[in-house]
Structures are given as C-alpha cells and as structure tokens.
Amino acid sequence: MFIIELAYASVFFILIIMFIVVKFLRKKYNIMPYPSEYQHVNVLHKRIEFILALVALILLVLSYIFEHSLTIILLVFSLLLITFVFRFYMQYKHEPEEKEYLITLVQAIGFFIITFGGIILYFMV
C-alpha cells in the first residue's frame, strides 16, 4: 500500500514541478498561451496528430477486448509520447519565434517520466 501512495505523491510532485517550470518559461521568454487549448501549426500537423490519436484509441479499445494486454497498453503510451515529440518538432520547425515548443517539451518529459515510472511500478508490485 505504501508503494501506491508513494506513486500518487510522485505523480503529484511531477505535475507541480511541470506547472512551476511552465510558469517560469512563460514568464522568462514571454510566451503567450494560445487562445484555445491547443492550436495546430498547419493542416499536415492536424492530420497526423488525428491519425496518431485514432490509432491510440483503437489500440486502447483492443487492450480492453484482450483483457488489458500490457503490450498494447505500452503501444498506446508510446504513440502518445510520439504525438508529444511530433508536436514539439512541428512547433520548433514552423513557429520557433513563439517558443511554445519549450512548453511542449516540458509536458513531453513529464508525460515520459510519469508513464515509464508507472510501468516500472507495475512490475514492482
């Protein structure tokens, strides 16, 4: 039970650190947040992210059908990480002056730490 509580505390701690780093980066580099939750850089970016999200959703449904297959769940998390990396690349390549890619990079690193920390915890318990 202690390990589960430690995992929740770790996730909370990582999210707090991410929040602080994002606030610091927005202030230091004067990064204005998008008017909506997220904006795509161009049509190609939007389509590829849609395809990645659709494949991840299909794999998530398949993992439910096949009784939470660990391999499929790992593929889903890998696709989500690929989506973050792709988003970072597109923002860096097409909108470097806005520096929003720094925020995406922090979010990707946080997602990576939480996801693979959870996988390690899964094998420990």
Image: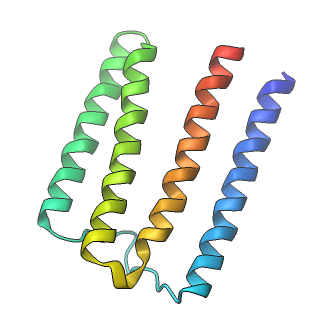
Check the picture and name the quadrant holding the C terminus: top right
Left or right of 2? Residue 65 is: left
Q: Position of residue 9 (x, y in %)?
A: 79, 43
The residue under the point 13% across, 61% down is: 44
The residue under the point 37% across, 52% down is: 85
Check the picture and name the quadrant holding the N terminus: top right
* On screen, residue 22 above or below 4: below
The residue under the point 37% across, 61% down is: 88
Outermost residue on the right side: it is: 2
Outermost residue on the bottom side: it is: 30
Question: How many marks overall?
Answer: 0
Q: Position of residue 87 (x, y in %)?
A: 33, 59
Nearer to us in this view, 32 or 60? 32
Q: Position of residue 30 (x, y in %)?
A: 53, 89
Q: Position of residue 23 (x, y in %)?
A: 63, 76
State which quadrant residue 96 falls in: bottom left
